[in-house]
Amino acid sequence: MSEAQEPPITDIRSKVSAMRRSYGEVGLTEGELDQNPISQFTKWLADAATNPFIVEANAMVLSTVFENQPTSRSVLLKDVTENGFTFFTNYESAKAIDIAANANVSMLFPWYAMERQVIVLGSASKIARAESEAYFATRPWSSQIGAWASHQSKRLATRETLENAYSELANKYPEGTPVPTPPHWGGYLITPTNIEFWQGRYSRLHDRVRYVRTYDAAAKTQWNLERFYP
């Protein structure tokens, strides 16, 4: 057997260094922005959902912090209302443990094909059990079984162990029969305090605007809109 060749690190480094592209002429002005960042977000989400070059427009990168160590992973947005952004997960997962210790989180929606991104800062809290159960009932049967089979973020000896657990649960809850919501599974609501919209522009002079929540009851709006250097 021949020795495995080392990857051409030098080659890929030079390629990465040279990777660049020019962004489009579409801008982002204060006049066209909605006063409500949730409304502005849903407009951009709708644009992303109809863009043929974007797969899973509701995919977001969720970042949490535990003992001063940040961690990021992709999850799916499943609802957005005036109250905030909702996603679902295993309550015993690493992200859930992080949130229990520090509820402050960040979400990133990277819509590269549209030269756009949205960053949301806020705090995460568990939603009502009834809401989690209602959503779980709408999931595909295979996903419901998977939620029971996976002890998310725990060490796994072999792939076979996971597949055997799935098969046992599939026999216990045959397709077409109700699958109860696992007690360790449910949703989180991220209540935003800061929502930033980024639009790529020419010469790296990108547009970057940020909504910051205010808590002045006398104010006409709950949000202040600010522009930042790119």
Image: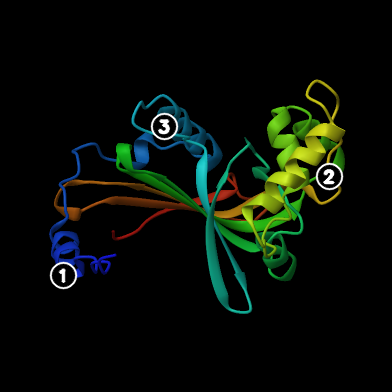
**Residue 74 horizontal side relative to residue 18, left or right:** right
Residue closest to the eye, 184 or 4 = 4
In the rendered image, which residue does mark 1 sit on? 10
Tell me residue 15's x, y (percent): 15, 59
Q: Residues within 10 Å of mark 3 (few under 14, many from 20)?
A: many
Dot 2: element: loop
Q: Nearer the viewer, mark 3 or mark 2?
A: 2
Label 3: which residue?
48
Q: Which mark is residue 165?
A: none
- Reading the chain from its start, which is encountered first: label 1 or label 2? 1
- Camera-side residue: 43 or 74? 74
Q: Which mark is residue 182?
A: 2
The percent position of residue 30, horizontal first and vertical second, equals 36, 42
Picture coordinates of residue 217, whole percent (x, y): 69, 52
Residue at 25%, 51% (x, y): give it: 206
Which of pointers 1 and 3 indicates the residue nearer the eye?
1
Q: Residue at x 84, y 31 (%)?
A: 173
**Residue in view at x 56 percent, y 76 percent:** 69
Q: Is residue 145 left or right of residue 41?
A: right
Contact (CB < 8 A) between labels 1 and 3? no
